[in-house]
Every structure is written in C-alpha cells, then in structure tokens.
Image: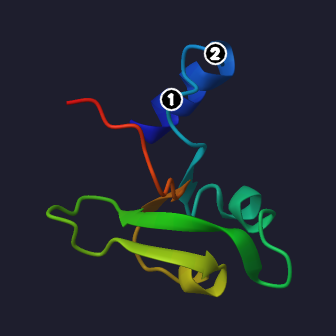
Amino acid sequence: LAQSLELMKKKFPSEYSFFPTTYVLPLHLAAFRSLFQNGQSMSTFIIKPDGSAQGKGIFLTKRIEDVENLSTICVAQQYIRNPLLIE
C-alpha cells in the first residue's frame, strides 16, 4: 500500500498530499538515511513493522541507528503530532 500511495503522490501531488512521505525499509534505507545528519534528525519518525497488528512493534525515533539493523520490513513516516482527524 505504501509503495502504491507514493506512486500516486508522484503523479498527482496535490490530490495525494494528505499523508507524509513513506519509506519502505530496508528497500528505501539510503533515501531515508539522507534525512539524518550525524545519525540524528530534527524530525521524529514513526516506524511500523510489516504484518503486525494492535500497535505491536511500532516506535518513534529521531536516530537512524534505531532502524538500520531491523530484521523485518518496516514502513517509516514523519510523525505528525496533531493530525487532522475526521470522525
């Protein structure tokens, strides 16, 4: 899903601007690593493991070392502190 949404975001940027840029790790690790300086980021990222449920394995980080050696496929996105929620 993440890869399909990113493809659509590239083709239709204004229509698909409702979600943050998504990185599938380790596939996009080099691009994700470029967001860090000296292993740290000013932004917080949410890391979500593939195939998990009920919030298991999800964590927040500002350090690249927290994701470089993960043994599973994960999705990384910039964390949105106050998202717009529609009820």
Q: For this rendering, which residue is in front, 2 or 80?
A: 80
**Residue drawn at the location 60% of the way across and 43% of the way down:** 21
- Which class describes the residues within 10 Å of circle 2: few (<14), some (14-19), or many (20+)? few
**Residue drawn at the location 47% of the way across and 64% of the way down:** 46
**Residue that mark 1 sits on:** 18
Q: What is the three-letter code of the residue carrying label 1? A: Phe
| Disc sitting over residue 4 in the figure | none
38 vs 3: above or below: below
23 vs 66: above or below: above
Q: Position of residue 52 (x, y in %)?
A: 22, 63
**Residue drawn at the location 66% of the way across and 19% of the way down:** 13
Image side of residue 38 versus residue 41, left or right: right
Q: Position of residue 67 (x, y in %)?
A: 55, 78
SS at mark 2? loop
Q: Quadrant of the C terminus?
A: top left
Whether residues under marks 2 and 1 lie with C-beta atoms below 8 angstroms apart, the answer is no
Q: For this rendering, which residue is in front, 52 or 38?
A: 38
